């Protein structure tokens, strides 16, 4: 299991970043679901060792969604969800990094997961669909709506994407 | 600012808590064992039901302890086995150490301990002690194996799965004394790897003489970069793919927080720069080890926690990382096939642009420093300087410095 141990040692930080965004900026929750996902991967390592990152990301997205589902009766704001700052008013669309997390936290879980996997983890539409267990069409529509919603929350022209 | 940049900026300072790796490994093992135990119990219940009867006789603690590890009932071995005083002293140290620190999921420490081996070492008498203990998540007792020496507990491990037993105890003394268990295999030790003109490493292996009980005592100082392997035959001198036997400290478990080694960066830009996410530093390290360019990464902190990637002019991509305080690189084709390995110079913390890794085939030089602006276009953190570039300007905290390139 040394390669599993190496994987955990080397990739935990990167996966924690994804988990943090998926959890809308709740670091404690992100560490919890990451630890839970990695522990569950231990027993499945032989089966998933060829693409452990893909497995981990899909599992993180599902865990984050389940966490939100469980808490849906008593919504909890991980960060202070006050008014999201918009542009600082000058040329290069400077954005307070935290405001991105705040804006993400206000999106529906699936929409947030789509944006994180597509734009932070650079998954293709097909890979994102596979990870979230939905169709490519859903990923496309969620991406489009998610970006539009982010624009509303953060101000027109604040964010660009390729 | 791009969405990706904003997300990366928002997560740049995140890192897992100290001890996270150990928690994952311990929890993963425990959960896996629990699942196997549940599965076995279900199968046993079904088998019993089919046979028409279920045996319901509670066993005594002694019954439960026996049979979980043959070492518990084996006669004490070692050249001090006939010395009752030494055996009693070892057991006393063991009991004192255990009662003051249960940990590792141990819930019951009441069953009898047994000295499996006791002998002399350069650091005085040492003993391998085994004791059945109860641990969370397992209905059956598990063997706790450890070594006591110099009046203290050197280390111990709960053996949840016999195939995962580490079986190596580093005394951490100036003499480099280690007790290594053969666990049914042959033991080999290699020290002082040699790097040739072609940058390839070689290691000579010698077999360790374990006694009939499978215990070997050896002296190996960390400066000699010792690697232990438990196998049926010795690895080849150019084989860097065997599984090393690691001490508990080398796995990162059970030790206090240690600051990041080497450059100490948390930098990762490969998500956006590599064509396949499968090209992780772990795979690059394995690719270099397969070619004898990188030594065994025995200790958990032998490699740095950063990686930088860059596309090369001929359409390949290069991944650079740090191990043993030295820079390494691997080049891959756009399809992800390994193309070439690079062994660079030392990675010196505190210097301006400590990463200056010359790529082969005239593909330029990777220049990197976390948080700096590099090159004529003031690229953030990483810049691939074109071949022939002799110097580069690096801006740190608003101060430009010109550094030469190799």
Image (cartoon, coloured by chain):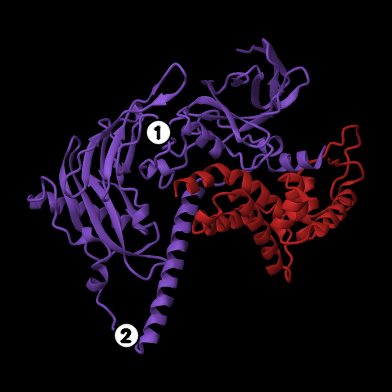
Chain colours: A red, B purple
Q: Determine whether the residue tagged by mark 2 lies in a helix, strand or loop.
A: loop
Residue B270: image location, x then y, percent: 66, 36
Give the image quarter of residue B255: top left
Residue B275: image location, x then y, percent: 69, 38
Q: Nearer the viewer, residue B254 or A10?
A: A10
Q: CA distance from mark 1 to mark 2?
A: 53 Å
**In which chain is the residue bearing label 2?**
B
Q: Is residue A86 visible?
A: yes
Q: Identify which residue is drawn at 71% across, 57% down.
A: A130
Q: Quadrant of the N terminus of chain B?
A: top right
* Label number found at residue B56: 2
The mark closer to the camera, 1 or 2, is 1
Label 1 sits on residue: B239
Q: Identify which residue is drawn at 22% across, 42% down.
A: B216
Q: Determine whether the residue tagged by mark 1 lies in a helix, strand or loop.
A: loop
Instruction: Say if B244 sits above or below B265 in the image.
Output: below
Query: Left of B232 or right of it: where is B283?
Result: right
Q: Is residue A80 visible?
A: no
Q: Mark 2 or mark 1, which is nearer the start of the sequence? A: 2
* Label number found at residue A131: none
**In which chain is the residue bearing label 1?**
B
Q: Residues within 10 Å of mark 1 (few under 14, many from 20)?
A: some
Q: Residues within 10 Å of mark 2 (few under 14, many from 20)?
A: few
């Amino acid at each position: 299991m040394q390669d599993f141990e190496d994987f955990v040692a080397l990739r935990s930080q990167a996966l924690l970043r994804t988990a943090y965004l998926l959890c809308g900026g709740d670091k404690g929750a992100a560490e919890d679901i990451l630890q839970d996902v990695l522990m569950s991967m231990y027993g499945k390592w032989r089966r998933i060792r060829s693409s452990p990152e893909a497995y981990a990301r899909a599992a993180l997205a599902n865990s984050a969604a389940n966490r939100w589902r469980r808490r849906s009766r008593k919504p909890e704001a991980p960060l202070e969800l006050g008014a999201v700052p918009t542009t600082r008013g000058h040329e290069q669309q400077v954005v307070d990094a935290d405001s991105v997390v705040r804006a993400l936290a206000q999106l529906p879980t699936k929409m947030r997961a789509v944006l994180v996997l597509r734009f932070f983890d650079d998954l293709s539409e097909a890979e994102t669909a596979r990870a979230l267990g939905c169709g490519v069409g859903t990923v496309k529509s969620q991406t489009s709506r998610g970006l539009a919603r982010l624009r509303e929350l953060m101000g027109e022209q604040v964010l660009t994407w390729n | 600012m791009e969405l990706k940049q904003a997300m990366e900026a928002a997560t740049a300072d995140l890192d897992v808590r100290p001890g996270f790796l150990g928690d994952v490994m311990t929890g993963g093992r425990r959960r896996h064992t629990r699942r196997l135990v549940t599965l076995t119990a279900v199968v046993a219940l079904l088998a019993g039901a089919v046979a028409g009867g279920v045996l319901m006789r509670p066993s005594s603690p002694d019954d439960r302890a026996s049979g979980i590890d043959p070492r518990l009932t084996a006669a004490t071995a070692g050249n001090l086995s006939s010395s009752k005083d030494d055996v009693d002293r070892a057991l006393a140290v063991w009991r004192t150490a255990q009662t003051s620190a249960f940990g590792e999921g141990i819930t019951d420490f009441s069953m009898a301990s047994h000295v499996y081996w006791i002998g002399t070492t350069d650091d005085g008498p040492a003993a391998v002690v085994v004791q059945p203990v109860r641990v969370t998540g397992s209905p059956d007792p598990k063997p706790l194996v450890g070594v006591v020496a110099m009046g203290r507990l050197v280390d111990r491990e709960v053996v949840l799965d016999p195939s995962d037993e580490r079986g190596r105890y580093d005394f951490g003394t100036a003499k480099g004394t280690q007790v290594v268990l053969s666990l049914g295999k042959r033991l080999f030790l290699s020290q002082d790897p040699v790097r040739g003109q072609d940058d390839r490493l070689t290691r000579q292996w010698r077999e360790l003489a374990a006694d009939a009980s499978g215990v070997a005592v050896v002296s190996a100082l960390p400066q000699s970069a010792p690697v232990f392997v438990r196998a049926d035959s010795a690895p080849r001198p150019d084989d860097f793919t065997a599984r090393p036997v690691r001490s508990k400290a080398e796995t990162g478990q059970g030790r206090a927080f240690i600051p990041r080694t080497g450059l100490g960066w948390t930098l990762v830009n490969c998500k956006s720069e590599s064509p396949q996410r499968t090209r992780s530093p772990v795979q690059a390290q394995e690719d270099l080890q397969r070619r004898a360019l990188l030594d065994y990464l025995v200790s958990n902190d032998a490699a740095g926690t950063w990686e930088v990637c860059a596309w090369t002019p001929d359409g390949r991509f290069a991944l650079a990382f740090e191990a043993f305080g030295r820079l390494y690189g691997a080049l891959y084709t756009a399809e992800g096939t390994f193309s070439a390995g690079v062994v660079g110079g030392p990675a010196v913390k505190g210097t301006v642009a400590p990463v200056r890794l010359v790529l082969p085939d005239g593909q330029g030089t990777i220049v990197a420093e976390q948080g700096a602006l590099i090159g004529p276009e003031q690229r953030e953190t990483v810049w691939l300087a074109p071949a022939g570039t002799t110097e580069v300007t690096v801006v740190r905290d608003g101060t430009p410095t010109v550094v030469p390139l190799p």
